[in-house]
Amino acid sequence: MVHTRFHASWLNPVEVFFSVVQRKVLSPNDFTDLDEVEQRIVEFEKRYNATTTPFRWKFTRDDLHALLARITEHERQESMIEPPRAA
């Protein structure tokens, strides 16, 4: 079983990056072939990596371990609850 956060905040930086690529690199769609698309993306990647700063994660490894422990305990307690019997 995979547990993901409902608001998926870890996806926000990825979505922002692809939005920037769409607006700055892929639009307008005036490419003559796939090699030109690749070249423009590679050039953007070099420029982007030269000017950006790393994202500082606030969710630590210890936070992850604590979250997984809470989930495991919750699942353990739920599995011990007996379903109501039909009358």
Image (cartoon, rainbow, N blue to C red):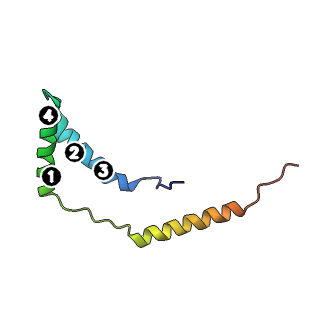
Kindly report the distance in space between the C-alpha atoms of the residues bearing marks 3 and 4: 24 Å
Rendering coords of residue 28 (x, y %): 16, 31
Q: CA distance from mark 2 to mark 3?
A: 10 Å
Give the foreground label among 3 and 4.
4
Using residue 24 as the reference point, say whether residue 13 is left or right of it. Answer: right
> Horizontal placement of 54 versus 36: left or right?
right
Considering only order in the chain, which callout, 2 or 1, is on the residue closer to the N terminus? 2
- In terms of secondary structure, where does tag 3 sit? helix
**Which residue is label 3 attached to?**
14
Residue at the image position 58 percent from the left and 65 percent from the top = 72
The amino acid type of the residue labelled 1 equals Tyr
Sooner in the amino-acid sequence: mark 3 or mark 4: 3
Q: Which residue is mark 1?
A: 48
Label 1, label 2: how far apart the Cα atoms are: 10 Å
Q: Position of residue 38 (x, y in %)?
A: 16, 38
- In the displayed structure image, the side of residue 5 where residue 18 appears, left or right: left
Q: CA distance from mark 2 to mark 4?
A: 20 Å
Residue at horizontal 12%, vertical 57%?
Answer: 51
Residue drawn 19% across the image and 36% down it: 26
Above or below 7: residue 63: below
Q: Amino acid at mark 4?
A: Asp
Residue 30 image position (x, y, % from top left): 14, 28
Q: Which mark is residue 20?
A: 2
Q: Which mark is residue 35?
A: 4
Reading the chain from its start, which is encountered first: label 1 or label 3? 3
Q: Cβ–Cβ below 8 Å for labels 1 and 2? A: yes
- Mark 3, Cα crowd under 10 Å, few <14 / some 14-19 / many 20+, is few
Of tags 1 and 2, the one toward the viewer is 1
Give SS at disc 2: helix
Q: Quadrant of residue 22?
A: top left
Which mark lies nearer to you, 2 or 4? 4
